[in-house]
Structure formats: structure tokens, C-alpha cells
Amino acid sequence: MSSWLQRQAGSHNVQLAAAAVLSGAAVAAGIFGFQSYQRREAVERLKKSIPGIDERHHAEVLTEYGTAGPLQKLSPEDERSAALARRAQQGDYDEDLILEQLARNRVFLTDDGLAKLRSSFIVVVGCGGVGSHATVALARSGVSKIRLIDFDQVTLSSLNRHAVATLADVGTPKVQCIRRRLEQIVPWVQLDCRNELYGADVSDRLLAPWSLGRVTGQKPDYVIDCIDNIDSKVELLQYCHSNKIPVISSMGAGCKSDPTCIGVADISASTEDPLSRATRRRLRLLGVSTGIPVVFSTEKPGPGKASLLPLPEEEFAKGKVGELGVLPDFRVRILPVLGTMPAVFGYTIANHVICHVSNYPIDYSLASKGKDGVNDTVFNQLRGLIERLVRAEDGNLQLQGMRLPLSRDDVGYMLDEIWRGRSAISGLPSRLALVPWERPATGFRIDPQWEREGQKLVRVGVQNLVCMTKEESARHEREVLRGGKRVEDVYDEKQLQSVRARLKEAEIYERNRVPQASSCIGRRPLIDYVKNSWDSSSSQRRTSSISSSSSSEFHGPQSARHILSMISAPKFRRYLIVYVILVVSFYFGWNSYLQPMLEERAGLVRALDVATMNQAGGWFGTNTRPEFADMVPIRSLDPALLPASEKAVLVERLLEKVSFNRENGDHLVFTGDLIHKGPDSSGVVDIARGLQASCVRGNHEDRILLLRSQMKIDNTFNNPEKDYNQIDISQRKVARELSDEQALWLQQCPVILKIGQVSGMGDVVVVHGGLVPGVNLDRQDLSSVMTMRSIDSETHVPSAKKEDGLLWTKLFNKYQELLSEHIAKSVSGVYGAVSRTTTVVYGHDSSTSLNIQRYTKGLDSGCVYGRKLSALVIENGGKNKIVQVKCNKYMNP
């Protein structure tokens, strides 16, 4: 480990990286320190700007939300009103005065209905523009017990829509503001004000039975939801639905301007309002799909109409835009509100509650709903027309189950809003039909993309539908859609201009409201329209995807609807994508890294297990080894050549770069293959001899020496080259180039060179190929020592091919690691254990290039193939480092 750290510390790249990291850390520390200093200075300035408490400046207790507390100093008029209200609520108020004030409601609702209304207990959650108007209307109409829940306070910007707030109320809690004003209007009404934020964790307390006055224990008769935060709204509605508390919810009044589009319906039918759609989706995930009446607007967005304002760029530049919200997860962007619309929403809600509590008969029959039959007729006629046109293209096509990408609501909108209920040709208002204006370039055909998915869909866009009378429709079908004429040949210029102008409106409607099947990818879900978080671009406001539409229009079993709602929810898709990414990453990480690593470790432990040895009948090397008479098996290096003082042992030749000097006691050791691995084999041998270097016998030396000996015996030194193949020619050439002295020097190179004990490395041994772990040096197979690359995991038989087993280096390192652990348990001190391990320095395997591990040091880095020549320098004290130089390419791998 220490040698690795030393090598890394000496690396130029590591030094550059360390310098970059340190400089970056210094710059970051400077920036953060300066910012911290600026924050402290700003806080100090802010503290100094706050005046001290004196006669002019009083300290007031704020709520946990940072708003003014409920105890505010009242004006003399408010004090008189509060005193009168306390007396009235205790019964000190003439009943005749109350009945006279409620006279109009009394004759409308009857005495029985008014009595029910006066005895009712209503909870209003949210006292802003909608909630304040609903509360005031209920109190004026006779409701005597009202609980107000809101954490917010009156602001200047809310005066345009609040029912009773004045300039004097700015900065005070909304619930207290309403209370003070209603005490002046209906002093007998009991108001339970809760200046709190509604949440699921406080539902039981905030919606608990009535606990004020003489009559207590009454459960809420109705809950009014006027919350503009989606999370709190869903929690309230889910709680009321689960506990069977009647509730009505207000949807979005922002960005609305048409009071005739406001209606009351079950939440499952409120398909036009974005806030309603988002609330409906969230409730479906909680198992609530119907049974909650809502007030919503069917008004469509369009060009020139108000929309959610984008956050200014300077706010983004300041950072932490989420802190601009009143509370975490609350909206931070400005929602335009026309002051009259919250009032209409509030009075509609109050009207609904009054009628239901008093059992007054009511039927929500809007004028547009009376046209449902007309819309159905026009839709069916359009469907029949499209079927005829498709059959005209292909008479053999089966059209059972054919669908159009339109709904009856689309048809109604086209008739009423785009074509104003009149024919585009004649202006007649009766017997109307919708007809494709022009024949598509591809004709009227089943969409092949959807047909492959088992659906028969014909693309008909509202931007190509024109309103005509039935007679005009028949003529248009005959001449344009089937006859092939152009619309310019059939209609005059005035009619064409009128139709084109209206079709542009239809195109805007299609773009702003209806998700097209062909472009559903990339559309933003409507839930993002209404979530309480900031958004950087107003251009991202789009309609929901086709999956959202389909889920809202699905009418199957309840369990199936719940599953479909979950699948179509954007958060579910995001979680699913993250889950899939994690699963795929884990799968590839397991298969490509973790599993192979664990299997390799298990294989190494199993290969060194004694039970495996017994099962295999003994390991290779534990029996008699073959003897070779023509080679030196083992030789020990002269102890005088071991590192001491400033001496060095070199295990490769990089003489110039390491400043090799024999006079200083440096010694050079070659790891084999000095010959037949470059252009000048005899020259390399001469250099080694001249430097009095040590060497080990490699497989190339062994092969050339055996060949040279055989050539002498057979007297074939001068045989013609044509009698041999290319490999033999190359080897014979090297054998002839070697002199007898050079051959004798190579002959004396041992197969195993014992360097001896080196501090931090244990017993150091130099070989060319490798060693079988667990086998003494004198029992190693010399041929395998020169050639091995792998070892069989069961028998420990070495092989020159990597694919025949485990890499010998991995098995050797694992064996030495286990040996070191075993010795450490019986020998005191870490160094005692290290001294009994063996470190092998080897060459031979250029395919793995430089391979430095704890107990094996592979130095063959492919110099002859144009890579690098490497040396292991062992210095005094066992310190070692790798030194390399670039080589020229002499042969291909």
C-alpha cells in the first residue's frame, strides 16, 4: 500500500489533479466565506433597522406561520359590536328582530326550512375570496354556527376579492376580519375562529363537533372547501368522504371571467377545470372517485386571456425561489384573479349549502345542458358521415368499433362557441351538422398506427370541421368530399373568408384544450398546471396527455379505475422510470461487476481449500516433479547485492532514466526473454553480461538454447533456409547469432532466482512466467514456471493459456493473503507476518501489460510491440517504484 501511495505521489498527473482540487476547494471556501459574511452583515443591518419597543412600537405575538395573532386591539366601534355579539349569543337579543332580518329567507325557505338552516353547523375551510363571500352569505341567510379555518392574513392584494376586508384589516388574520364584520351584521351568529393551517394530522380536531355556547356536540352539517393548495384540499375532501361528512369544494376561480360558465356537478363530471382534474386524480388514487359536489367553470383558455404569470428572471437569479411561497410546497407565482369571479363561486357554494340544509328542491339545469340531445344527434351524424366516406375509400373494410378523436363536449363547443349555433354557409340556426371542410390529402382512412394496436380510429380534427345545415352538408359531401371539387369552386369568397376565420379559432381551441393522439408525447400533464410550485416558463402550459384523458373517461369497475388512475398519474410514471433505471443499473452492475467479482473470490477460496485438494487427489507440485539436466533450476542472489544504504536492485533495464551505476552497488536483474524479442538479441545479451546482471530463464531462451543444442548435434547450422518455415527460420537465425560464450551465459540463468528478504515485500523471487501457490520452490515444475499464465482451480495444474483456468496471479495473491492472516495470528507484529510471505516479480504476460499487485509484480508491458519498457526499482528500506520508457514497435502482437 505504501509503495502504491509513493508511486501515485510521484505521478505528474496526480500532482496536477491534487493542485486542481486544492485550488478549487480554496476558491469555493473563499466564495462561501464571502457569502456567509454578506449574510451576517445583512442580518445585522436588518436587526439594527428594527425599532425598539416603546410607546409608539408595541411587540405582538405572531402565529407559527408568521402572521398576526388573534388578539388584536379593537377600535371603539369594533369593541361595541363585539360586546353586542357576546350578549346576543348568550340569548340577550330579541327573536323578532332576528326573524325580521331573515324575513325574505323565511318566506322563501318556509319556517321549517329556515329552522333547519338556523340550527345547522357549517365549517368553512379557507377564508379568502371564495370562502369570505360564502361565509357572509351563509351568515346573512341564517346559519347560526360557523367555524372558520384559515392560517393566512389579509393583504392589500386580496382586497379586490375579499367580501368584508378593509384597509384597516390588512395584516390581521382573515378569520378575525370576518368575525369582526359579521358581529356588526348578524351579532347572534356564533363564530368559531381557527387561525390554523388545515392538514390531515389536525383533521379530527378542526372538524370536531361544535363546542361553544349552550348547545355542544353537534357534528358538522356541511363542510365548505375553499382551499387553494392542492395537498390540503385533497386531504380535506378525502377525510370528509371517508367520515361521511357532507362537503362541497370550490375549484379554481383564477383566470376566469365568464360567470355563465360556472356550474355545480359531481367531481367525476368536472372535466373542464384543471384544478378539478388534478384534485380528481389525486382523490382517485385514495379511492375517492365520486360523491363530492364541486363548483367549477367550463371556461376555456384562449389567446388574450389571463394565465398563470411566470416568475421574474431576477427572482431566479437570487436563488431559492421556493422560499417565496407562503409555506413550503405553496404556489409562488401570481395567479391573476378577476375580483368578481371568487364572489360568484362563493355565492354559488352558499346557495348550494343553503338549499341542501333546508331541503329546498333544486335542480342544476343549465341552458347548455338542454343541448345534450342536439350534441348527441350532431355527433352521431358526423360519425355516420365519416363511416360513409371511409367505406367509399375501401368498401371491404369492417368499421365495427370505429372511433373518432372527438367527444360530445367537443361537438357542443364547436356548435356554440366556434360557429355560434349557425350554419357557416347560410347562417341558418336549425337542422345543423358538422362536416369536414376539406378532403384530407391521404383520404378518409383508418389510422394505421392505431390499427396496429387494435383500434379503428379515423383522424378528424376540430380545425377541419364546419357547421352547416343538413341540406348543405349533403351537397358538400357530394361535391367536395366525394366529388373531388375544391371548396374555392363551390363557395364564394365571402363564405370562404368567414369559414377560414372561424377555423382559426377552432385551431386555437384544439391547441389549448384537446390533446391530439398524434402529438401526445411531450405534452405537459395538467397536474403540473395546478401544483403549488414555481415554474420558469409560461410557454410550458399545455394540456394533459391522452393517458390522462382516457383515465378520466374510463367507466369500468372501481378497482380497474383505481389501477388506471394510478398508472396514468405523472408521479407514478416518474417513480416507475426511476425504479426501472435502478433495476437496469443493478442488473448490469451485478452481471458485469458484482457477480463476477464475488464468483472469482469464491473460486479463489474454493481453489485453496484443502477439501478441494483431497477431492482432486492432490495438487500439482505435491508429487514428484520432472528433472531437467540442461538448466539451472534455482539460484540465490548474492546477499551483497541486496539493497543497503544507497544501492538499488533493478528488475528491468531503464539505465539512463534511473541513473543506474554499478559502482554505487546497483544491480540489474532481467525477468527473461532477452532474446528473440527484438532486432538485436545478441546485443542485449552483451549488455547484460557487461553489466554483470542477473537473469532468469524465459520460455524464449529455453526454446532457442534447446534449438541451438539440437542444431549442433544434427550439424544443421548451415542448412538452406528454404527447408524451414518462417518461425523456424527466425529461431534458427537467433541461435546462429549467439556465440558460445553468450549461450553459456544464458544457459547459466536459473529458472527461479531467489532475491532474498526485502523489507515490506517478504521473500522476493524472480521468475519469467509464474509460481504455483503453496508449493515449495524446489518442487515447482520448471517448464510451467517459464510459461504459465493460468492455473486450474481444482488440480492447480498450470497452463500457458489464460482460458484454461484462473489467472495464477489472482490465486497466488489470495494464497499469500490467507497465509499472512494465518501467520499474523501466531506471530506478534505485522512485519513478522510479512517477512514470511513471498513476492514474485515476473515478465512473460505482455497482454495484461504492467500488472502490479500486493504479492505479484508483472513487468512485461509490451515493449517489443511499441508500448513501454518497465522496471521495478527497489531502494533502501524496501521502497519501490515503477519507471517506464516508451519503445519503438518491432513486431505485431
Image (tube, grey):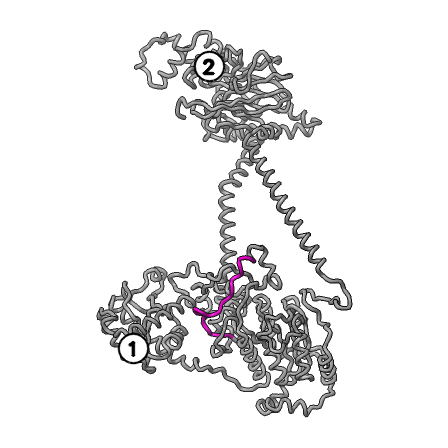
Q: Tell me the amino acid under the disc marked 1.
A: Ile
The label number, if any, that marks residue 425 in the structure image: 1
Assess disc 2: are there few (<14), some (14-19) or many (≥20) residues with their C-alpha within 10 Å of its C-alpha. some
The label number, if any, that marks residue 684 in the structure image: 2
Q: Earlier in the sequence, mark 2 or mark 1?
A: 1
At a point 34% along the width and 60% down the height, the residue shown is 449
At a point 64% along the width and 74% down the height, the residue shown is 167
306 vs 70, nearest the viewer: 306
At a point 62% along the width and 75% down the height, the residue shown is 124
* 185 sits to left or right of 312: right
Instruction: Determine whether the residue tagged by mark 1 lies in a helix, strand or loop.
Output: loop
Seen in the picture, residue 882 relative to 326 is either above or below; the reply is above
Res 32 seen here: yes
Instruction: Determine whether the residue tagged by mark 2 lies in a helix, strand or loop.
Output: helix
Image quadrant in which you'd find residue 404: bottom left
Seen in the picture, residue 739 relative to 818 is either above or below; the reply is above
The x and y percentages for residue 332 are 57, 63
Provide the major secondary structure of the magenta segment: loop
Res 610 seen here: no
In the rendered view of the protein, which quadrant contains the C terminus?
Answer: top left
* 696 sits to left or right of 827: left
The x and y percentages for residue 266 are 51, 75
646 vs 561, nearest the viewer: 646
In the rendered view of the protein, which quadrant contains the N terminus?
Answer: top right
At a point 56% along the width and 84% down the height, the residue shown is 355
Seen as rendered, the residue at the extreme right is 54
* 9 sits to left or right of 728: right
Image quadrant in which you'd find residue 65: bottom right
Which stretch is magenta?
296-314
* 58 sits to left or right of 65: right
